[in-house]
Image (cartoon, rainbow, N blue to C red):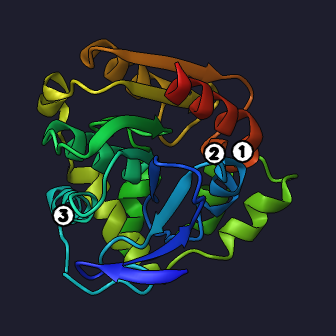
Amino acid sequence: MYNKINGIHYEFIENSASKENLVFVHGSGCNRMFLRPLAKKLKDFNCYLIDLPDHGQSENRHCTKVEDYIAAVAEFVTQLDNVRLIGHSLGGTICLGVAAKRVPSVKMNVIISSGAKFYKFDRKIHNMVREKKVNWLYLIQCCGSLTNIDVWADLLTFEPAEVILKDFEIDIKLDIENVMSHITIPTLIMVGSDDILTLPEYSTKMHKAIKNSNLIIVPNVRHMLPIAKSTYVAQHIREFMRS
């Protein structure tokens, strides 16, 4: 089922037996379809896969900083009850910001392949923004797991180049490290040991800063962790929420 809340378009995968609402927040240059392989492994919950503003079929808000996305997602989840946020990459940063706002409906946070500040981005990211041209060879290298059919299917769902580049510019500038001490809800942090885009050290730093957080570093996988290892990631999310 598809619908909109406050201008945010979402896909809803319902489980009428569940009272828990999972809200999936995609990363840079993506849309609601990106995390669908993971959501399909979590059908024992209600799953909301959203398009961020300016992405997919959501309304354009001309977002220029991460705080714009955080405000939009916070507005979305206030309309729901019993929310568990699941964010990948930039989506994970957005979920950190929402959790720091202490929205009453948000009960847990899952942050995958992300960070509160991307202070060691490769120069290739900066070059893409400066030259206004997507370096697909580098992005594919960052993704990894190229023998996985779901990874290739996801690569075909990316947004137009201008959206990708706008998000990368936001990534370069963002810094919400100061909000992590305000997060009090249980937080699961996951990252691939070989991630060269959102480095494992970002996740380690989040884990140290966020009370009541768990950290899982998954060996031999890069940035496409929630897709390439969807069954594994889903199982850990399920165990975390049931614990």
> The residue tagged with tag 1: helix, strand or loop?
helix
Whichever of labels 1 and 3 marks the residue nearer the N terminus, that label is 3
Task: Determine crowd level at label 2: few under 14, some 14-19, many 20+ residues with C-alpha closer than 10 A.
Answer: many
* Distance Cα–Cα, label 1 vs label 2: 5 Å
Q: Which residue is mark 2?
A: 226
Mark closer to the observer (3, 2) = 3
Nearer to the camera, 117 or 41: 41
Task: Determine crowd level at label 1: few under 14, some 14-19, many 20+ residues with C-alpha closer than 10 A.
Answer: many
- The amino acid marked with disc number 2 is Pro
* Distance Cα–Cα, label 1 vs label 3: 28 Å
Q: Which residue is mark 1?
A: 230
Q: Position of residue 159 (x, y in %)?
A: 50, 79
Q: Are marks 1 and 2 in contact (CB under 8 Å)?
A: yes
Mark closer to the observer (1, 3) = 3
Q: Position of residue 67 (x, y in %)?
A: 15, 56
Question: In the image, which disc is placed on residue 75?
Answer: 3
- The amino acid marked with disc number 3 is Glu
- The amino acid marked with disc number 1 is Ser
* Residue located at (43% from left, 48% from top): 87
* Residue located at (60% from left, 44% from top): 223
Give the quarter of the image for residue 139: bottom right
